[in-house]
Image: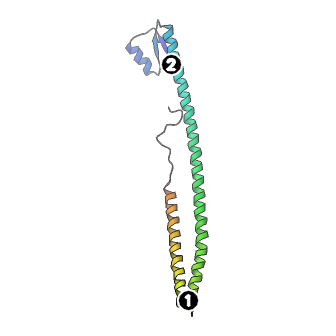
Amino acid sequence: ILITARAGKANYLDAMDSGVDDFLHKPFDRDRFIARVRVAMRILDLHQSLRLANTDLERRVEERTAELEKALQAKSEFLSRASHELRTPMNHILGFAQLLSLKKGLTEKQEASVRQILESGRSLLTLIDHLLGFSKSHANELSFEASGAPRAGNT
């Protein structure tokens, strides 16, 4: 709060342009001065509260981002393991079914069953590939960018 003997609009504007928050000229009213000091103190308190709230929000965003990144990593590891755990036995089943299909002397019913195993196994592998590919492509679409919000202290 600037207290000066120089009154007038030009002096007021010069003072405000130089960064003064409030302006009083002499002689000044004591009650008005006290009221303006209280307002200035309240504004300072509000700015400090805002800085603290921004700092807390930034910390919380960083924590949530780290948690999300860990969850995405766990999902990626799960998909990788699931892919291996599902494909390996399915490939064994398909391999044995192919060996059976080459065997001579199977009845028509057995040949039909082997064909069904092969068709179902291939369909299941295709489905597994599509599901895992879909999950991985969507995981790669997620990105995080902090923008548009001022840092605490720039308010």
Spot occupied by residue 14 in the image (x, y as percentages of width and height): 41, 18
Rendered position, 2 above or below 141 = above
Identify the residue at horizontal 52%, vertical 37% (top origin): 151
**Colour approach in the figure:** rainbow
Q: Find the residue positioned furthest to the left.
A: 9
Could you tell me the amino acid type at mark 1? Answer: Leu
Task: Tell me the SS state at disc 1.
Answer: helix
For the residues labelled 2 and 1, the Cα–Cα distance comes to: 92 Å
Three-letter amino acid code at the position of disc 2: Val
Residue visible at 52% across and 12% down in the picture? 34
Q: Mark 2 or 1 closer to N-term?
A: 2
- Residue 74 lies, in percent from the top left, at 60, 57
Residue at the far front in the pictured view: 109
Circle 1 residue? 102
Residue 27 placement (x, y as % from top left) = 47, 5
For this view, does 103 lie left or right of residue 2?
right
| The label number, if any, that marks residue 81 in the structure image | none
Mark 2 surroundings: few (<14), some (14-19) or many (≥20) residues within 10 A: few
Camera-side residue: 62 or 79? 79
Q: How many marks?
A: 2
Do the residues bearing badges 2 and 1 touch, measured as CB atoms within 8 Å? no
In this view, the residue in front, 65 or 19, is: 65
Task: Name the residue carrying label 2.
Answer: 39
Determine whether 66 is above or below 127 in the image.
above
**In the image: residue 88, left or right of residue 33:** right
Crowd tier of the residue under label 1, counting other residues whose Cα lies within 10 Å: few below 14, some 14–19, many 20 or above:
few
Q: What residue appears at the point 52 percent right and 77 percent down from the top-left corner?
A: 120
Q: Is residue 35 above or below residue 97?
A: above
- The residue positioned 60% from the left and 73% from the top of the image is 88
| Spot occupied by residue 123 in the image (x, y as percentages of width and height) | 50, 74
